[in-house]
Amino acid sequence: MFIKKFTKKLTLITVTAITLGTSLFSSIPAFADESGFEAAAESAIAIDEKTGKIFYAKDADKVRGIASITKILTVYLVLDQIKSGKLKWDDKVEIDDYTYAISSDNNLSNVPLEPNAKYTVKELYEAALISSANACAIALATKVAGSEKKFVALMNKQVKKWGITDAKLINSTGLNNENIPEQYRYPNSSPTEENQMSAKDVALIAQHLIQDFPEVLETTKKTEGKFGVGTSSEVDMQTWNWMLPDMDYAYEGVDGLKTGTTTEAGQCFVGTATRKDWRIITVVLHADNSDLDTGARFTATGELMDFVYNNWSQKEILKKGTTFKNVKPYPVKDGKEKEVALELNAPVTTWIRSDMDDEKYKVDFRSGKEKELIAPVDKGTVAGMVTVSLEQDNLGYILKKDKVEYPMVAKKSIKRSNFFAIIGEHFLEFINSHL
């Protein structure tokens, strides 16, 4: 079980003063889990990193403040620029007046920057992830797009590409507009507005970040680092992810990902952990008791991870060669037999929760492009695909397209009919089609 090593208390003023740290979506219920578990947060979700299978969801479609979790999208765009060659790790980034002003406010950024100084992309990237440095994120956004406002346009373009249509993005950091000078606020945004997404949105972005740029975990797993090495402003950085090794809420296998805190968002955390080569992604937005317990998001995340690892597993529920009553024999053209029975061409392995019945499942068949097979038909010829889902599992996948399909194939070979029989059948088809 997850064990909270220390309980820390902090006043509301202290906790909230610093901001640190869908057409393609499957529709999921607000409280989809029936096992009795409830995450200690206003919104939460847990998914399999590889497949996007949803293991738990609580108000996961509800759009809420995400605070500095925003930075996983910011660094995704930076890494994409690196990959495309438009940006290099040793490129220098000059600090403008706005970025310097943010870095000078201890309530907004904990990594000081020098005015008109230049820092490498690598330095700023690590500070944004390890120490959740807001000014460093702004500097990166400005380097990529020319201004933070233009960078927000890139952020919106990217999330829409992934099928996220409900996100509200106004900056690269997650800061509330209250903390941003009016002239630097995103056009038409309100004085108290901040970035908002659903827990499901966050999980999807985290999945893309880990899958497209797994090297990000080499940074997010660091508990400390140095910034401005060799300069007068050199500082030691400390992670805000207290679930990493040797931290107060250390949890086996955690190597990321990002915290976030504002008054509106409360304590938020998108986490990821791996056990026995099984990586999960969890999101908690506005953890319970955020105003009293500085570790609330980590307690909630640890309990959610425990729930997933202790209750979910993969199990083979159907063997190769299985047939289904609702999958009818497939038409065969020009064959000695006019149809052929179909069977599974591979065993079905599915995610199953410990309280679910693996003998209660539903099967959906999707025929191939050709509505009939043409003789001769070899045994094993693919005729269509099936999805098999447990009746007790209404959670599905984070994207509809992520559902797993299995091939249904001809159970036996069908020989081609003789020449004259085929000619006769074709002639009758022609006559019937022209009557």
Image (tube, rainbow, N blue to C red):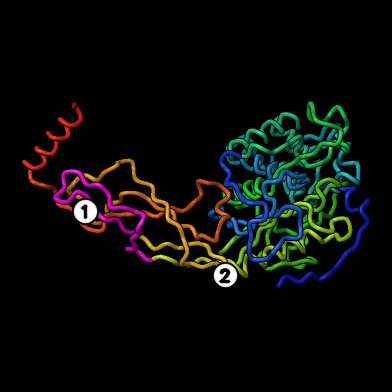
Residue in the image at 81% along x and 60% along y: 296
Along the viewing direction, whichever of 314 and 272 lies nearer the viewer: 314
Tell me the SS state at disc 1: loop
Residues in magenta, as a range: 319-344
The N terminus - image quarter: bottom right
| Residue 258 horizontal side relative to residue 363, left or right | right
Q: Report the disc number at residue 278.
A: none
Q: Secondary structure at mark 2?
A: loop
Disc 1 marks which amino acid?
A: Asp
Q: Is residue 348 visible?
A: yes
User: In this picture, is 155 found above or below 213?
Assistant: above
Disc 1 designates what residue?
Answer: 378
**CA neighbours of label 2 inside 10 A, class few (<14), some (14 to 19), many (20+):** few
Q: Position of residue 206 (x, y in %)?
A: 64, 49
Q: Please state which of residues 188 and 435 is positioned toward the viewer in this rendering.
A: 435
- Asked whether residue 230 appears in the rendered view, the answer is no
* Image quadrant where residue 222 sits: bottom right
- Residue drawn at the location 14% of the way across and 50% of the way down: 336
Task: Say above or below: 404 vs 192.
Answer: below
Q: Which residue is mark 2?
A: 354
Q: Tell which tag, 2 or 1, sits nearer the viewer.
A: 2
The amino acid at mark 2 is Ser
Magenta highlight on residue 341:
yes
Main SS, magenta residues: loop
Q: CA distance from mark 2 to mark 1?
A: 40 Å
Does label 2 or label 1 sit earlier along the sequence? 2
Q: Position of residue 252 (x, y in %)?
A: 68, 68
Residue 118: image quadrant is top right
Residue sitting at 17 percent across and 51 percent down?
337
- Indicate whether residue 231 is drawn in magenta: no
